[in-house]
Amino acid sequence: MKSHINSLKAIADETRLRILIILFLGSFHVNEIVEILEMGQSRISRHLKILQDAELIFSRREGTLIYYYLNFDREKNFQTELIELLNKYKTQISFYEKDFVKVQEILDTRSQLTRSFFDKLNGEAQKIKEQVLDVSVYKETLLKMIPQKKEILVDFGCGIGRLFSDYKKRVKKIIGVDSSSNMLSLAKVYNKKISQLQFIQSNLEKLNLPNNFADVVVTSMVLHHVSSPYLAIQEAYRILKPKGTLCVIDLAKHNKEFMRNIYADLWLGFEKEVLFSWLEQARFKIQKISEISTEMDLKIIAIKTIKE
């Protein structure tokens, strides 16, 4: 009961309530929250500690930065249910629209950093990138997760579409989505012999695709480049048909800071628990999980989920 009281006390403050609403839109570090709320860092840090002590939010280190995220525990508890209730009524809270605009500015800045990197990526640089994490490392695992004889597969962050020829054996139509016009131009050349192929230039957090549209969505080594991975997962849920399949392939949490600097990685991988909580909060049912080791001493997490 004491923890319940602490949680209720924690949200009985406008600033802390605003922080929680901000974290519904993604994970942010202190400086970003300071910029969004236009308040001093010491004040924000104090509020973050109160929310952490109340177990409403958690934190994780990303290189030199510490990011904060909501407590979407896999096991339902009072804090999780309280957060879900706040989420239901978040648009009715004062400052929501103002904070939403500031959050979008932060996310747009992150996206621009990633987009700029891939827009400059030429053939030689692409080869160097693939030597770090070659698609062959996880290709077989990914293809086994994709159901056979489906209509539409949407590839989030498709890059140059190296697996499109393999997808074509399983689905009738492929839609490649990427924020980089350069990557899409390369993908069109690389896959010019494949019919029933469509490309869309877009950020993954907001797609111009209808609800209940796709049979399969693949996010293959892309979420660690996305400004708000949870929003991308929500978009996957929205565009998938009922019982549709989401396949997630991404890096497990690591400490190789050079990958942020060289490859424009926004996130240094993810803890399994964080991915699980995002997927389950978005109402996906996890069907299969596996881990793949690499020569770089990195691990890759592979997760197959179904839209409930």
Image (tube, rainbow, N blue to C red):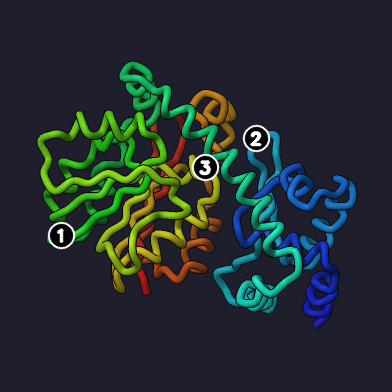
Residue, disc 2: 63
Q: Is residue 156 above or below residue 193?
A: below
Three-letter code for the amino acid on which mark 2 is drawn: Gly
User: What residue appears at the point 16 percent right and 62 percent down from the top-left corner?
Assistant: 150
Q: Residues within 10 Å of mark 2 (few under 14, many from 20)?
A: some
Q: Position of residue 79 (x, y in %)?
A: 69, 74
- Marks 3 and 1 sit apart, C-alpha to C-alpha, by 29 Å
Q: Position of residue 185 (x, y in %)?
A: 28, 31
Residue, disc 1: 148
- Point out the image quarter for the C terminus: bottom left
224 displayed left or right of 81: left
| SS for callout 2 | loop
Three-letter code for the amino acid on which mark 1 is drawn: Gln
- Marks 3 and 2 sit apart, C-alpha to C-alpha, by 11 Å
Residue at the bottom extreme, as displayed: 1
Closer to the camera in the image, 254 or 169:
169
Closer to the camera in the image, 125 or 298:
125
Residues tagged 2 and 1 counted as in contact (Cβ below 8 A):
no
Closer to the camera in the image, 112 or 251:
112
- Marks 2 and 1 sit apart, C-alpha to C-alpha, by 40 Å
Q: Position of residue 131 (x, y in %)?
A: 35, 24
Three-letter code for the amino acid on which mark 3 is drawn: Gly
Q: Position of residue 87 (x, y in %)?
A: 63, 72
107 displayed left or right of 162: right
Report the disc number at residue 269.
3
